[in-house]
Structures are given as C-alpha cells and as structure tokens.
Image: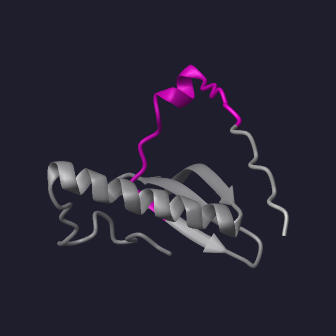
Amino acid sequence: MPETPAQPQVQIQLQIDDNVAQGMYVNMAMLNHNETEFVIDFIYVQPQAPKAVVRARVINSPKHMKRLLHALQDNVAKYEAQFGKIDISGPLPHPLGMPH
C-alpha cells in the first residue's frame, strides 16, 4: 500500500483585538450539546443578583470539543504539577452552581 505524503505544517498568525485580549471574567458555565455541536455559555453571576449575563458563547464540533477537553486536562495537570493540587471542595460559589 503506498504511503500518503505528510501534510505540511501551516503557520497560523493569530490576531486579537485589544478589548478581547483583556479577557472577560466569568464565574459560571453552562454546557449543552446535540448530535452535531457543543455549546458553552460563559456567564457572570453577581452575588445576590437574580440575573446572570452570558458574556460569551462558544460553539464547537464534537471532535473539537474532545480536543479542547484534552487540552484543558493537560493544562490543569501541568498547573497542579507546578503550583499544587487545585482544591475544589466546599460549597459552590453560587446557588446555581455549574450546570452541565
């Protein structure tokens, strides 16, 4: 069976606007999915406030979502190796918790 030639690596230059580069604080996330996509809403909930604001929505394919999951797991492991275990015990910061 003939070998397929390797695809050349493509260098991607990232561009980020100043307001996006500053980031957006969120303290909650909601995750939903259907057969073809995953949707993550990143939300800010003010303490004692009855409303929450979706600050960003990210829509991914299932394959990309699994790659993102692996990248998150890898980065958390590296963080904990350098700075120690992240303690997630105790009450959730808001009664709504982290829906999934």
Residue 16: image location, x then y, percent: 60, 26
Q: List the single residue furthest toward the left.
A: 84
Give the residue furthest to the top. Answer: 18
For residue 39, side relative to residue 81 (left or right):
right
Please, which residue is most extreme toward the bottom here? Answer: 35
Q: Quadrant of the N terminus?
A: bottom right
Q: Within the magenta stretch, is there residue 31?
A: no
Q: Position of residue 69 (x, y in %)?
A: 50, 64
Between 3 and 55, the one nearer to me in the picture = 3
Q: Viewed as shown, does residue 9 lie left or right of 16?
A: right
Residue 85 shows in the view: yes
**In the figure, 83 relative to 95: above or below?**
above
Query: Which residue is found at the position 26% from the left and 51% from the top?
Result: 79
Image x and y of residue 3, in percent: 80, 60
- Stretch in magenta: 10-29
Query: Could you tell me what secondary structure mostly forms the magenta stretch?
Result: loop
Residue at the spot 68% in from the left edge and 58% down from the top edge: 59
Identity of the residue drawn at 77% across and 72% down? 36
- Is 39 or 66 nearer to us in this picture? 66
Residue 24 magenta-highlighted: yes
